[in-house]
Image (cartoon, rainbow, N blue to C red):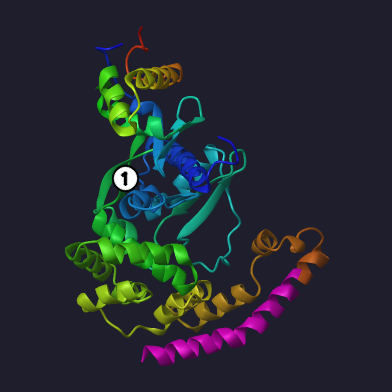
């Protein structure tokens, strides 16, 4: 997980940011996703492409949580995005 | 997403759904070789409301060339949309805007061949506005929207169209008046002059204090024609009819117009007055109701015209 860059497949999703959270519409599945503030904090990085470590660092810096907690949150988030087919390229590894 | 989600989130979700419909419609129009310009909606939300709660929108406003209106309507019908019965008597005035609704998802498309308040006797908007566009990503594809100066022009005209009674266009106008650069406003005023609606553009701007300041800086006129004063005062349906009536040539054309207004085709009356449908006595009662309604409102309408004429001098 650590070296790989994760990037949103923007061709599959439209979104709006509202009060620090994100509501996204998955085009192919006609499904809405509600992304909480933690995910919303990682969203801009995923638009550009970011490594797992980058995203963990963002959560640690922003919320003052420990690294283990951050790794759990980022893992859960990228796995959720992968299950919905919203990550460009292959799904998450490790 | 549960119904308990914050209203702003729900509004955002609805807007995303509208964007999907927009993308679907624009793709279908492209396939039928009908060029289109997306008006308002995401173009305004992303431009004037970036720092605030998202501006909600519930329909797709699409402008097409005047000679492509029927073809665009056919495209919408192929997508499952139905034309909503019109609110205007078919006097012979070219239609400017038509509403289409799709029952299965309650999607709404406002199909424009022009802009209300701009295109009264002739449909001139497309020829000018189609030169003032840029791309915008909506619903997963690039669509064509107005460029900033043309959007600025449209914001003022949209406020003018609805007058002082409808808040959303006025809020758009306030934001544009306080955030859009002076040079862009000058460019927008140039568009208004090209379309020969500088007085209406000014009247729209002067509906809010922030806009009045812009109008003064641009040295736009204070005085307006009677029709302009009427529309800015909110009498747009009546004034559309009046404006069309005034440009008719000859007594015969004017008389035919009045006759159709008082006694419209049965198909029109049945479409706008459900109680007129069914056996002929219901249709007769429908005509009587219409005559009564016109008689009741005529004095107030004529007083409004007289007031507007006095205030426009």
- Seen in the image, is B22 located left or right of residue A93? right
x and y, in percent, of residue B142 in the image: 32, 38
Determine whether B38 is above or below A56 in the image: below
Q: Is mark 1 on a helix, strand or loop?
A: strand
Question: How many discs appear?
Answer: 1
Residue hosting label 1: B144
Residue B12 included in the magenta stretch of the image: no
On-image quarter of the N terminus of chain B: top right
Determine whether B71 is above or below A13 in the image: below
- Seen in the image, is B47 located left or right of residue A20? left
- Seen in the image, is B28 located left or right of residue A46? right
Q: Mark 1 lies on which chain?
A: B
x and y, in percent, of residue B11 in the image: 50, 46
Our reading of the magenta stretch's main secondary structure is: helix
Residue B306 included in the magenta stretch of the image: yes
Residue for point 63% across, 82% down: B297
User: Residue B205, can we see it?
Assistant: yes
On-image quarter of the C terminus of chain B: bottom left
Determine whether B24 is above or below B126 in the image: above
Residue for point 40% across, 71% down: B160
- The foreground one among A91 and B108 is A91
Quadrant location of residue B196?
bottom left
Quadrant location of residue B107?
top right
- The foreground one among B220 and B51 is B51
Graded by Cα atoms within 10 Å as few (under 14), some (14 to 19) or many (20 or more), the crowding at tag 1 reads many
- The foreground one among B124 and A57 is A57
Q: Residue furthest top?
A: A94
Residue for point 27% across, 81% down: B221
- The foreground one among B253 and B123 is B123
Magenta stretch: give its range.
B286-313
x and y, in percent, of residue B207 in the image: 38, 75
């Amino acid at each position: 997980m650590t070296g790989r860059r994760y990037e949103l497949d923007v061709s599959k999703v439209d979104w709006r940011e509202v009060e620090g959270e994100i509501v996204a519409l998955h085009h192919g599945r006609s499904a809405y996703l509600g992304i909480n503030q933690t995910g919303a904090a990682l969203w801009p990085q995923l638009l550009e492409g970011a490594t797992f470590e980058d995203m963990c660092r963002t959560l640690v810096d922003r919320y003052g949580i420990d690294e283990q907690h951050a790794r759990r949150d980022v893992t859960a988030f990228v796995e959720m995005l992968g299950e919905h087919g919203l990550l460009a390229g292959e799904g998450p590894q490790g | 997403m549960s119904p308990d989600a914050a209203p702003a989130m729900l509004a955002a979700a609805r807007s995303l759904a509208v964007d999907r419909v927009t993308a679907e419609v624009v793709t279908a129009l492209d396939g039928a070789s009908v060029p289109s310009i997306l008006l308002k909606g995401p173009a305004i939300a992303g431009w004037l409301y970036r720092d605030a709660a998202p501006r909600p929108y519930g329909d797709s406003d699409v402008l097409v060339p005047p000679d492509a209106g029927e073809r665009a309507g056919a495209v919408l019908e192929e997508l499952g949309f139905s034309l909503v019965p019109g609110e205007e008597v078919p006097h012979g005035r070219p239609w400017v805007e038509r509403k289409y609704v799709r029952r299965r998802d309650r999607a709404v498309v406002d199909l424009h061949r022009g802009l209300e308040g701009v295109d009264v006797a002739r449909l001139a908007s497309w020829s000018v506005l189609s030169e003032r566009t840029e791309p915008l990503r909506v619903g997963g594809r690039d669509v064509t929207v107005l460029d900033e100066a043309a959007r600025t022009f449209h914001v003022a005209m949209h406020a003018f169209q609805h007058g002082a009674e409808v808040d959303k266009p006025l809020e758009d106008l306030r934001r544009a008046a306080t955030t859009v650069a002076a040079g862009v406003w000058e460019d927008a005023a140039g568009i208004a002059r090209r379309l020969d609606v500088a007085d209406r553009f000014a009247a729209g701007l002067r509906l809010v204090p922030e806009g009045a300041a812009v109008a003064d800086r641009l040295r736009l006129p204070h005085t307006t024609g009677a029709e302009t004063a009427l529309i800015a005062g909110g009498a747009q349906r009546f004034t559309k009819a009046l404006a069309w009536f005034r440009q008719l040539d000859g007594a015969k054309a004017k008389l035919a117009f009045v006759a159709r207004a008082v006694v419209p085709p049965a198909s029109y009356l049945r479409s706008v007055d459900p109680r007129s449908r069914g056996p002929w006595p219901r249709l007769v009662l429908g005509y009587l109701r219409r005559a009564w309604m016109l008689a009741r409102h005529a004095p107030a309408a004529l007083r409004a015209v007289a007031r507007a004429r006095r205030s426009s001098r």
